[in-house]
Amino acid sequence: MKVAVLTGGVGGAKFVLGLQHCAGIERLTAIVNTGDDFRHLGLHISPDIDTLLYTLSGQSDAVQGWGRAGERWAFMAALKALGGPDWFNLGDGDLALHVWRSDQLRQGKTPSAITTEIAECWGIGATILPMSDDPVATWLDTDEGSLAFQNYFVERQCRPVVGKIRFEGAAGAKPAPGVVAAIEEADMVFIAPSNPYLSVDPLLAVRDIATALRNTAAPVIAISPLVGGKAVKGPTTKLMSELGIDPDNRAIAAHYEGIIDGMIHDAGDAGPASLPACATATLMSDLSDKIRVAQAACDFARTLAG
Amino acid sequence: MKVAVLTGGVGGAKFVLGLQHCAGIERLTAIVNTGDDFRHLGLHISPDIDTLLYTLSGQSDAVQGWGRAGERWAFMAALKALGGPDWFNLGDGDLALHVWRSDQLRQGKTPSAITTEIAECWGIGATILPMSDDPVATWLDTDEGSLAFQNYFVERQCRPVVGKIRFEGAAGAKPAPGVVAAIEEADMVFIAPSNPYLSVDPLLAVRDIATALRNTAAPVIAISPLVGGKAVKGPTTKLMSELGIDPDNRAIAAHYEGIIDGMIHDAGDAGPASLPACATATLMSDLSDKIRVAQAACDFARTLAG
């Protein structure tokens, strides 16, 4: 069985980790949001790719949800002593990934080639693909002006009120090599429980990705990021309210209309009425939760593929 | 009293630290070799400037002689796990200096402006000036081919046999702002006990620096790097032998002919016959040694200034 999954940050990575442990998946391809990528201190940082790399290789910090387990912060302390910016935390070990990737990019390698090499180096069985090798940058028009994603998300901690979200470069961006084929060849496609507006929309804004999703005969299933009516982490419902959208699964299903064939949602929330849905406990605390949710998604997809 | 000192790496930094503690110096300017500067992993690294910054701000590692005290190595471990190069050690805290400087350079600041800001940030009283804001790169023609300085010095640990040393870019390099004025205004000028061929010659290869040294009426005093006939650290005598030069103070004085007016040398070594010399114990283990050697150099310069 071939599985493709579109994913963003921490919640998405948990689901992909679950998929990695599901039986019967011979090929798993994660197609990852790069709208959060940014340059900081001259380094190219790719947070969603890194979260997935750390999660699938067993190096992620389970407590804080991002970065590496056992991380230390001597670099940040020294940077602060130099008067450098301290709003974006870069761990001592994590820095290696950013410095290494930045240097490889400067030498002309593509983001997808670099990601593939790192995944192989760390023994990750799944294929991890950035959605595009072309730069796409998520910008938010807010009551504090236009903010690049990380300035909104990390520096301002999602406090500004969002009016509009834009994905600069997405219109002209080509999917990275292998992305469209992974969707076309997949027996089932998942949209991980990532923020639909910030983490998944950048992927759908790459035209050939959206087209491949619309055209595939395989079932496309979204796993709702809502658990008990709220996102486990991040500003999903705050953002939905600000955008004038009811923060529920009906709205999320409507948002994905034409793309998805079904939805997995938390048993504590009402499902969408407009399409097949499967209710289960979707909070993914430990590995067994992740595997269970991923397995439920696979089973549900199989019933839809019928 | 105004003092200018030309300096390179660890030995030079010890001497400058001594000068910083000498009474009666109202202005101390260190003019620093940048021929060792190189790009590594996309970072601009300036080892001699950094050694001096760490030494004068009390952050240097007294045991290993370079880098920061209490340094940790999570970055290097993670870089190695990525298959990155591990021949040049970058400490977790030290990285902040390289990342910060590289980013400031990219934003258009000069090396000298960045150095001044860091020195001020760390409360260093002395003025630290890179010899030039223009790139100068030390290359060695060896029995293993042409090697950039760090590849010879760190990666190959000075093992190759050196035939010739070149300073690429030096002919066209202008001294950094303040360098020539510091020499012209100084009441005494020192050449620190750094490797004459690798650390001091790049400075002298910048024409306007050599001219200022030749023209100044102030005494110019070299402190010999030999202690008991050998360099405390580094390949000075090995290099001198390979270049067909007797590894003694006579040869070092001849090397600096036309530049220096006197030499401080270790009491265990023969002095040069060709110019005034002052013998003292020049091994600088603790701070009191450094201050004593620096004070001896100042006193000797005063006698020459008559």
Image (tube, coloured by chain):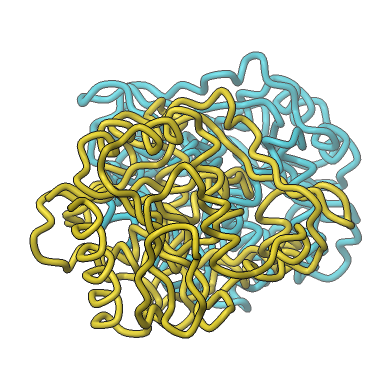
Chain colours: A cyan, B yellow
Residue occupying image coordinates x 77% and y 32%: A176
Q: Position of residue B19 (x, y in %)?
A: 23, 64
Foreground: B22 or A9? B22
Foreground: B85 or B232? B232
| Residue A269 in view | no
Q: Is residue B55 left or right of residue B302?
A: right
* Quadrant hosting residue A56: bottom right
Foreground: B116 or B239? B239
Q: How many marks?
A: 0
Above or below — where is B137 with respect to A224? above
* Quadrant hosting residue B10: bottom left
Residue occupying image coordinates x 43% and y 58%: B275
Residue occupying image coordinates x 37% and y 21%: A164
Residue with the most extreme top position: A172
Residue occupying image coordinates x 38% and y 38%: B213
Foreground: A113 or B295? B295
Above or below — where is A245 with respect to B258? above
Q: Position of residue A146 (x, y in %)?
A: 31, 22
Q: Position of residue A79 (x, y in %)?
A: 34, 55
Q: Position of residue A185 (x, y in %)?
A: 91, 40
Q: Is residue A277 left or right of residue A119?
A: left
| Residue B23 in view | yes
Q: Is residue A294 left or right of residue A160?
A: right
